[in-house]
Image: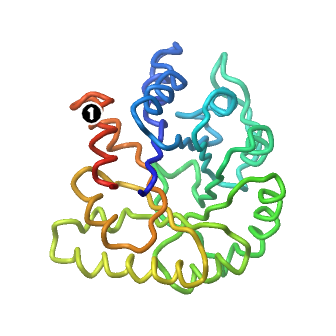
Amino acid sequence: MTALSINLNKIALIRNSRDTEYPSVAIHAARCIASGANGITVHPRPDQRHIRADDCYELASMIEVEFNIEGNPFAPATKSARPGVSDYPGFMEIIRLTKPAQCTLVPDTNSQLTSDHGFDLQQDGDRLAPIIAELKNLGVRVSLFMDPSPTQIRLAKDIGADRIELYTGPYAESFGSQHQDNILNQFIEASDVAYEVGLGLNAGHDLNLHNLFLFKNSVRNLLEVSIGHAFTIDAIEMGLDNCIKSYLSCLR
């Protein structure tokens, strides 16, 4: 079955809206795992607007399912602007200290509301190759956030990635429209190329209970999906336990 990794960024965002530790990211991680989630995903950014470096350290010390930390490997150390919040030590330093099961490298910036495109490896491949090598030496599986481009996916294999995570925003946007089949076919082709070159396949961004089943049953060899924004909304409406069960049902 395709693994379900729950992204807890939105839980952290709610917590950060007040000067409090409630809701607890760690407690929500434990509840998701107890309800059947196969993994936990976080995306610490330099501005620490949701997940903070300290959250990564706490989660790494407590969870026994797959821990996936995603972010921009070129993000530097940054001083915290919020009292009581520790400085951001740089993305790669977080990985060195936590050694998660998987690290998903994403080409995002602080100015983006959310990740909205994959790597251009013709531009960034040479810079990424030594980072990928370091992560693998740490025993961390490496996934690259990618658009459904066969050329780019082949380059991901060439520079040493273990997996790719397909950015599924365009699929989610087209779902139910006249463009759905054309966009979905791009992802099917991308999944075939990933399988052909020996890359594992993850997917994430705007997947939800309406569009996940079709995607999972169309693309080839989908190993893992990461879901956060829709999960948080669905958990409010359905309750966390029922929400997890519903997503797992889509993936069976």
**Left or right: 170 as drawn, with respect to 166:** left
For residue 229, side relative to residue 102 (left or right): left
Q: Percent x, y for residue 228?
A: 41, 43
Look at 59% across and 58% down and name the residue there: 106
Between 156 and 128, the residue placed more toward the observer is 156
> Is 247 above or below relative to 14?
below
- Residue under pointer 1: 242
On the image, the x and y values in percent for residue 38 come to 48, 43
Residue at image location 74% in from the left, 67% down from the top: 128
Horizontal side of residue 240 vs 225, given as left or right? left
Above/below status of 125 relative to 172: below
Of residues 94 and 68, which is closer to you in this image?
A: 68
Q: Please report the residue visible at 76 percent of the width from the left and 64 percent of the height from the top.
A: 132
Amino acid type, callout 1: Asn
Query: Is residue 148 placed above or below 242 in the rendered structure?
Result: below
Q: Residues within 10 Å of mark 1 (few under 14, many from 20)?
A: some
Place of residue 41 in the rendered image (x, y in percent of width and height, measured from the top left): 54, 43
